[in-house]
Amino acid sequence: MVLVSCNKEANQQRIAENAKDAKKKKIIFENIQKGWDFYDEPINEATEESITIWVDLRAFMQELGQKPKKTISAYQQKSAAISKKAMVLNMNIPVLFDKPQIKSRISVLITKVRLLDMYIHLNNIPDKKVVQLVGEINKELATLQRQMDILTEKSKIPVEEGEDEMRRMLLDSARAIPNNTVMPTVISAATRGIINPNDARVE
């Protein structure tokens, strides 16, 4: 009877723990589901035009736009897919955007996406941190697009006639100046007395 009673208590405790765990996982899932809201559309027309030539960025944003459903494992799979798309953003950047300021923003974006993928695959998922990272990824993506807009607008500014030739001339002039320029020798006061005053010297 004692053994049966102990087994019964153990089963009841296990059932209670399972129910508590299931409730916790449900809350985590609902929080992630509610906070999983990526800005998957270009923020303005200039960015929309730019994305047409940047295939990898377009694919990344399309992946962001496909929201998972039903289970936490679906969100884990989606996070892995987003991370995979983000990792190639630095590889085939269009010439217009192949600039240090764009690359640095992509690096930050990739870091945030990889952190999201790491957190959502933990046994005890920190749902608040996951939701926070979704917001940070949105912020980095908006910053990247604003920088793209700046470069796009600059590329539309017409070059003044002769500006390219002047730039080339300045560059050629800079290259023509030797780096090993000899500095004049400064003569100490003690030595000046034994030097011919008619000789050229530097004061």
Image (spheres, helix red, strand yellow):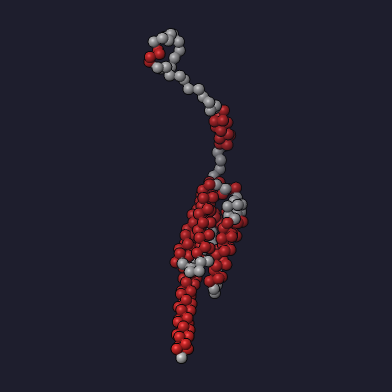
Q: Tell me if 32 is positioned left or right of 54 in this view.
A: left
Percent coordinates x, y for residue 186 in the rendering = 43, 19
**Displayed quadrant of residue 58:** bottom right
- Picture residue at 47% right of the left edge, 81% below the top: 14
In this view, the residue farthest toward the left is 189
- Picture residue at 47% right of the left edge, 87% below the top: 3
Q: Is residue 66 visible?
A: no
Q: Quadrant of the C terminus?
A: top left
Percent coordinates x, y for residue 2 in the rendering = 45, 89
Percent coordinates x, y for residue 83 in the rendering = 56, 60
Foreground pick, 75 / 166: 75
Foreground pick, 108 / 125: 125
- Picture residue at 53% right of the left edge, 47% below the top: 100
**Displayed quadrant of residue 62:** bottom right
- Give above or below for 193 relative to 171: above
- Picture residue at 56% right of the left edge, 62% below the top: 82
Q: Is residue 178 visible?
A: yes
Foreground pick, 144 / 46: 144
Percent coordinates x, y for residue 146 in the rendering = 50, 53
In this view, the residue farthest toward the bottom is 1
